[in-house]
């Protein structure tokens, strides 16, 4: 009985930890291919498009610039929380 309870607790803890790790933001570095201030999106040279926050100021960024994007997957969208020159 103790082994069963311990195994169950261990399994629950492992699943909880895995869920937390998956929720952590990712960081991607790349070169801007296109930047659309109207739709608040940036597309990198690798073809991935990121949704920027509505309040993000795109001034100062341009195609060809290397950037670092902090983002999370929300459904099928790559939602960026930050983009910095890099």
Image: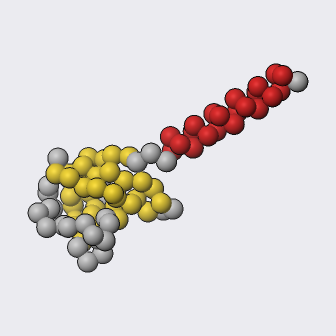
* Residue most extreme to the bottom: 38
* Residue most extreme to the right: 1
Query: Nearest the camera: 53 or 64?
Result: 53
Q: Position of residue 63 (x, y in %)?
A: 15, 62
Say how the picture is coloured. Answer: secondary structure
Vertical order, 6 against 30 (above or below): above
Vertical order, 86 against 60 (above or below): above
In the rendered image, is residue 66 in sight? no
Query: Nearest the camera: 22 or 41?
Result: 22
Q: Is residue 60 left or right of residue 18?
A: left
Name the image quarter holding the N terminus: top right
Q: Position of residue 84 (x, y in %)?
A: 20, 52
At 65% from the left edge and 34% from the top edge, which residue is drawn?
13
Q: Is residue 47 left or right of residue 16?
A: left
Number of callouts: 0
* Residue most extreme to the top: 3
At 61% from the left edge and 40% from the top edge, which residue is drawn?
16
In the rendered image, is residue 81 in sight? yes
Q: Position of residue 75 (x, y in %)?
A: 51, 62
Q: Position of residue 11 (x, y in %)?
A: 70, 33
Q: Is residue 14 left or right of residue 57?
A: right
At 33% from the left edge and 57% from the top edge, which residue is drawn?
81
Q: Quadrant of residue 18?
A: top right
* Residue most extreme to the left: 60
């Amino acid at each position: 009985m103790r082994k069963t309870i311990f195994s169950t607790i261990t399994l629950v803890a492992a699943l909880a930890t895995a869920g937390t790790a998956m929720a952590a933001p990712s960081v991607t570095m790349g070169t801007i291919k296109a930047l659309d201030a109207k739709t608040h999106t940036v597309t990198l040279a690798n073809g991935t498009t990121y949704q920027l926050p509505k309040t993000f100021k795109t001034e100062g960024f341009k195609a060809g610039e290397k950037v670092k994007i902090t983002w999370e997957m929300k459904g099928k969208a790559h939602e960026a929380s930050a983009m910095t020159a890099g």
